[in-house]
Amino acid sequence: MTPASFTATFRILYIIFTLVDYDVVSCSRFSDVPDTSHRTAMVLPLFPPKDTSVRSSPSQLSGRLLQKSPVNAQMALHDDLLINGYYTTRLWIGTPPQRFALIVDTGSTVTYVPCSTCEQCGKHQDPRFQPEMSSTYQPVKCNIDCTCDNEREQCIYERQYAEMSSSSGVLGQDIVSFGNQSELAPQRAVFGCENRETGDLYSQHADGIMGLGRGDLSIVDQLVEKHVISDSFSLCYGGMDFGGGAMVLGGIKPPADMVFTNSDPGRSPYYNIELKEIHVAGKALSLNPRVFDGNHGTVLDSGTTYAYLPEAAFVAFKSAVMKAVLSLKLIEGPDPNYKDICFSGAGSDISQLSKSFPPVDMVFSNGKKLSLSPENYLFRHSKVRGAYCLGIFQNGKDATTLLGGIIVRNTLVTYDRQHEMVGFWKTNCSDLWDRLNLSPPPPLPSGLDNTNSTGSIYPTLVPTGSPGYNASGEIKVGFITFYMSLSVNYLDLKPHMTELTHLIAQELDINFSQVHLMNLSTKGNDSLIKWAIYPAGSANYMTNAAAVEIIHHLAENHDRLPDTFGSYKLFEWGIEPPPKRSGWWRSYLIVVISLSVVLILGLSAFLGWLIWRRGKESALPYERVESVETVVREQELQPLK
């Protein structure tokens, strides 16, 4: 999916329910940038969705006990909430494993990927799943507990989403792996193999959906049913300046100061919390507490980008925020077609936003309070530097309160389904493992030396070595280097270097201008290239989070390249600090600035003299009009021949 501006407005979407089941997704999940031009109110089903595709035993998941000591799957999150509209994690399916980037979604139940037999699937991040290439794949055969295809041979699934995209296909069963970062062993699980997708599902960059909702087809439910994890999972989204994050499938020891609220699975088919009040600048909004309990109540949806309040709550919230930011200037939003509420004058330093914007507190029915930073209810204005817009909107005429990912940026959210609670803990998601005292995922590789025989741009490696940088945010990364060898001759490669540079930039999700060729050499018929990845724009360095994300892509991604580039090998990546400017450089800079000032002053004086001289000339007496016109005509007119 190419970056485009998807901003938000409210449309009333109408879903006609047939005999198939429906998951609900906010359109903003598939949006691309913080402009909010597709900002859709969440439309929930007219009745609770049921998973009739596969039915489990009537035993309650929350009461299941593990047969052995609990383990969990620690998994990295990728992408960025407002740039991409979603977060993805990596999942491997089949034997040998085939890798996929899936949107983590607590509002969906089915996990699905595009199938090689798909008749209508878009171009996504990874190749389609090939059942015929997996020795462990088995179709889920038609039975009385599922919806069957027309030939009554195989179980199928069909999903319709609120923004009118859809996915349908067959159900299959195969080995699912969670990466070598996980202590959870690969498990056999049921998933959807897409044969058709429409709307944003067709155009998005991510491959598919990882369903974390409640339902028999949910990956969480399946793992709990197998007694390999406890009935819990956690998500931690990066902040305004940091993409990525972390996910844990299974239980973790909650921090002592984690704030919990009840989550009644009987209240709705979604993950609910019992929100009672919202405070702005320490003052409660004048609202009836029941305003947050309308329709489906207050719903958490990791796949929704922004937050949506019932009309009365939104009006009160907007008014309170505007009263608290009188020192800022109210400006138009990034898209003039929509009435976004935006403010300028706050500056670009995220850490200083609390000086300009008020604190917001969410108070639960048990009296516990979750404090929100400005990054939890604002998004950057895409056209005005230092300006921000409210990322909380009115949910049309729907009485549901919908809290998307923006509310929980830099917040660990634990969905403790066994005890029917949801916990919140404000933290820096980039160093979550250290703060939880968990065994962190293995460090990133100090070298890559794995030939990819299938012709992919990056081998599917799992990080193994130590890169020697501090992930806590103390070290600034100037640029990243890595080597690529290609089994093609230099003369054959040279005409395609621009194409190769574009493909690398596309794979790493960075700008083309950030990819620099540092060195090119030949050895026999092979070519060896040293590349450098520089910070975006005019920045002198990139954050650790940005560098880690790029290196993860180098280690994990395996998009295919045209046959022109032959087979590939990556190795010997490294990071370099920002260049230091010496005293000589500063002196040189002063001289250059001084000369520039002298030159500008000289040009200004010369232009001033020219203007003065013209003024003097214009003061001379003019000849009579008649005589001037006569001379001009005699000079310009040519005799007729």
Image: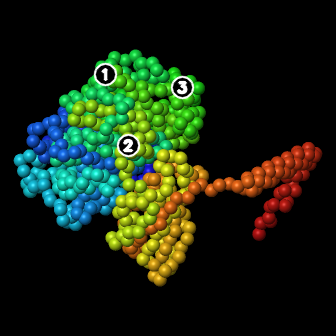
Q: Quadrant of the C terminus?
A: bottom right
Q: Is residue 223 visible?
A: no
Q: Earlier in the sequence, mark 2 or mark 3?
A: 3
- Marks 1 and 3, Cα distance to the nearest angstrom? 29 Å
Task: State the SS at label 2.
Answer: loop
Q: Is residue 490 above or below residue 611?
A: below
Residue beneath label 2, please? Answer: 437
**Nearest to the observer: residue 422 or residue 342:** 422
Residue 365: assigned label: 1
The answer to whether the residues at label 2 and label 3 have Cβ atoms under 8 Å apart is no
Question: Could you tell me residue 175's position as x and y percent?
Answer: 21, 57
Q: Is residue 388 above or below residue 5?
A: above
Residue 455: assigned label: none
x 38%, y 55%: residue:
442
Residue 325: assigned label: 3
Question: Could you tell me residue 619's position as x and y percent?
Answer: 91, 44
Task: Point out the frontmost of discs 2 and 3.
Answer: 2
Q: Which quadrant of the figure has residue 454?
A: bottom left
Q: Is residue 539 left or right of residue 389?
A: right
**Nearest to the observer: residue 498 or residue 366:** 366
- Marks 2 and 3, Cα distance to the nearest angstrom? 39 Å
Q: Earlier in the sequence, mark 1 or mark 2?
A: 1
Q: Earlier in the sequence, mark 1 or mark 3?
A: 3
Q: Amino acid at mark 1?
A: Ser
Task: State the SS at label 3.
Answer: loop
**Nearest to the observer: residue 367 or residue 33:** 367
x 48%, y 63%: residue:
573
- Marks 1 and 2, Cα distance to the nearest angstrom? 30 Å
Q: Is residue 514 above or below residue 569?
A: above
Question: Could you tell me residue 504's position as x and y percent?
Answer: 45, 63
Q: Amino acid at mark 2?
A: Asn
